[in-house]
Image (cartoon, rainbow, N blue to C red):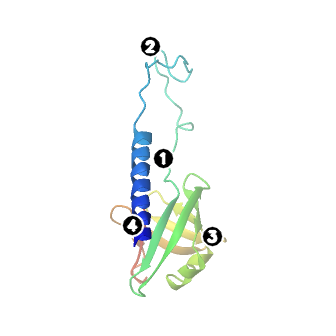
């Protein structure tokens, strides 16, 4: 009984010391004085100079970042996770589906390319360019199968 009390007391003391230490560690440290950065970049126009228009070829394209999607086939009651990866071109990205996705959509594991079309639809193709799956934009961060004859299929972006 005394050993149990000693263990509990020691645990509580250690937890209290840890909590106190974490509290001190988390307190933001204020700087003595805030000083502006003296570096002036040539990319920032100085006061009084007119801004030159940026050529369309140099403007950054807004590309979607790599993401993980949950693929759900409601007709078969199956689900798996796929990855939309790095950019290959301005509209095309890497795509990876693990072997367990073959039960969700036949041929999905062969898919290697995610292409974002101008109308917002997505075409997932294999290494030879054959379409594995065509998707249309759903609500928020989801996509749905574009073909009416296809299974009830949805892709939902995970946070």
Q: Position of residue 16 (x, y in %)?
A: 39, 52
The tag on residue 5 is 4
Q: Residues within 10 Å of mark 3 (few under 14, many from 20)?
A: few
> On the image, which quarter does residue 119 sit in?
bottom left
Asked which secondary structure carries label 2, the reply is: loop
Q: Residues within 10 Å of mark 1 (few under 14, many from 20)?
A: few
Instruction: Tell me which residue sits at (49%, 27%) in the image.
Output: 53
Question: Which residue is under mark 3?
Answer: 129
Asked which secondary structure carries label 1, the reply is: loop
Instruction: Tell me which residue sits at (38%, 83%) in the image.
Output: 74
Question: Which residue is under mark 2?
Answer: 47
Q: Earlier in the sequence, mark 4 or mark 1?
A: 4
Q: Position of residue 37 (x, y in %)?
A: 51, 20
Q: Earlier in the sequence, mark 4 or mark 3?
A: 4
Question: Which residue is under mark 1?
Answer: 62
Q: Residues within 10 Å of mark 2 (few under 14, many from 20)?
A: few
Question: Would residue 8 be found to the left or right of residue 67 on screen?
Answer: left
Q: Quadrant of the C terminus?
A: bottom left
Q: Quadrant of the N terminus?
A: bottom left
Calculate the distance from the C-alpha at mark 4 to the C-alpha at mark 2. Answer: 71 Å
Q: Which residue of the protein is positioned furthest toward the right in this rendering?
A: 128
């Amino acid at each position: 009984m005394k050993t149990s009390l000693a263990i509990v007391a020691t645990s509580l003391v250690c937890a209290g010391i840890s909590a106190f230490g974490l509290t001190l560690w988390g307190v933001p440290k204020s700087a003595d004085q805030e000083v502006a950065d003296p570096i002036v970049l040539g990319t920032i126009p100085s006061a009084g100079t007119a801004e030159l228009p940026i050529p369309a070829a140099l403007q950054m394209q807004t590309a979607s970042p790599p993401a993980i999607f949950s693929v759900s086939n409601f007709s078969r009651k199956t689900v798996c996770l796929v990855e939309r990866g790095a950019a290959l071109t301005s509209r095309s990205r890497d795509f990876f589906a693990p072997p367990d996705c073959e039960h969700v959509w036949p041929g999905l594991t062969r898919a290697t390319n995610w292409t974002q079309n101008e109308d917002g639809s997505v075409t997932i193709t294999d290494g030879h360019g054959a379409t594995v799956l065509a998707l249309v934009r759903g609500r928020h961060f989801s996509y749905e199968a574009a073909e009416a004859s296809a299974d009830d299929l949805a892709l939902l972006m995970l946070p």
